[in-house]
Amino acid sequence: MILTSRDLLLFALVFGLIIATGFTQSWNVALGIFNMGLISAIMALGVNMQWGYAGLFNIGVMGFVALGGLGAVVISMPPVNDAWAAGGLRVIFALLIGLATIIGAAQLWKRMPKGAPRALAIIVVLVAGFFIFRALFDPAVEAIEAINPATLGYLGGLGLPVLFSWPVGAVLAAGAAWLVGKTALGLRSDYLAIATLGISEIIIAVLKNEDWLSRGVKNVIGIPRPVPYEIDLQNSESFVERATSWGFDPVIASSITVKLAYSSLFLTVLVILLWLSQAALASPWGRMMRAIRDNEVAAEAMGKDVTARHLQIFVLGSAVCGLAGAMMTTLDGQLTPSSYQPLRFTFLVWVMVIVGGSGNNFGAVLGGFLIWYLWVMVEPFGLTLIQTITSGMTDGYWLKDHLLESAAHMRLLTMGLILLLVLRFSPRGLIPER
């Protein structure tokens, strides 16, 4: 696909806004917006694969993003040896028992003839497996969480370079998507949406409550970086001399350097994903997916396995969201399960796809940058606007106080307004599908 002059102008406008922020505020702010814009664009690409390619309505994006963040913890954090000695192997064994119970019940369902004996056998296997699982799992978890709970209280990770966690985060999300898809993709679109939302809430609940895995609401901090730390750059004589010779404050220069290093990594991932997505969309596979999206009955009549293809694209899109989640956790340097909210990690990503243009990969990328920029900048702009409007009112006047207190909600109002305007005047998005 070739971008038109109008498309290029839209990208230039969005990046111009980010650059203007660097000049008017600070380059740290501008680069922070740019980095999160890159991650948001990758999330939007993942949702666009599911909705734009195949018409799958997934509103459980938050859960797959959170699993990607968990991947960063599992891979990059150092192992807690005392916790492993206290109950790590017992937890693994208990989880294997639970998995074997589920597999055993599924095999009985397949192999035994329908009737009361099959139902009874499945109930016996599930109940026995549950009690054995809990008898092994609960004491092991208590022992793990008792190991220095203020700072540790979990198993930790493998201590590998954090960049390895990015594909692992994608694999975790893809695995969860396969399990969800095998059970939910046969449902009607509205039921699929409800199922994915429920699964995502279950994932977040597990991360919040299973301290042995992710420290729960106590958060995992200090996730290793793939780029230097600012303090190390500030302690480097060569860096300080170079920054000073160029007229920069070494502290500010170190922060900008770190953000630029993140930008190069994230931009590389986005470019590779965008290239692969475009190649897939232009291939016979992409044409088949769009044919299934537009008319499932006709595609099935032509011999296409619609359910299998839906599962395939659902797993691929979720893997991309998981990759973005691992990248975001790496950028933040911490995993905070309580911060995963549907408003930020589902609704906002859907706004990016709809505003940018569903079915168009470049549109999803544009929407990712534009909506994230507005999400960050609208609140301070709104506060300035309200302060200007109410400047003639006396201090303490109820209307002035009410408007100033409501400035924090400007971003929600703006997102809704933008969505309505785009749906009214450009219902296929800013860069529509060709």
Image: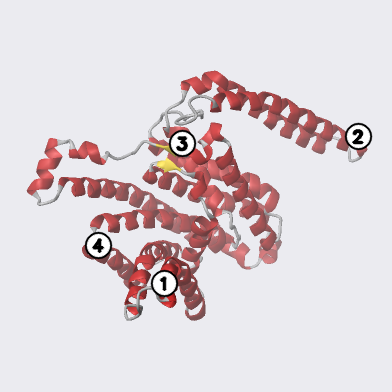
Residues at discs 3 and 1 in contact (Cβ within 8 Å): no
> Which numbered disc, 2 or 3, marks the residue that appears first in the sequence?
3
Q: Nearer the viewer, mark 1 or mark 4?
A: 1
| Position of the N terminus by quadrant | bottom left
**Mark 3 neighbour density, 10 Å: few (under 14) some (14–19) many (20 or more):** many
> Which numbered disc, 3 or 1, marks the residue that appears first in the sequence?
3
Identify the secondary structure beneath mark 3. Answer: helix
**Mark 2 neighbour density, 10 Å: few (under 14) some (14–19) many (20 or more):** few
User: Residue 346: x, y in percent?
Assistant: 53, 58
Q: Is residue 79 left or right of residue 228?
A: right
> Which numbered disc, 1 or 4, marks the residue that appears first in the sequence?
4
Is 415 in front, or is 138? 138
Residues at discs 2 and 3 in contact (Cβ within 8 Å): no
> Which numbered disc, 4 or 2, marks the residue that appears first in the sequence?
4
Q: Is residue 316 above or below residue 139?
A: below
Q: Is residue 159 left or right of residue 189?
A: left
Is 191 in front, or is 115? 191
Amino acid identity at mark 2: Pro
Q: Is residue 42 above or below residue 366?
A: above
Quadrant position of residue 300:
bottom right
Amino acid identity at mark 3: Val
Residue lying furthest right: 116
Query: Mark 2 highlights which residue?
Result: 117
Question: On residue 401, which mark appears?
Answer: 1
| CA gap, disc 1 and disc 4 | 27 Å
Q: Nearer the viewer, mark 2 or mark 3?
A: 3
Query: Mark 3 highlights which residue?
Result: 73
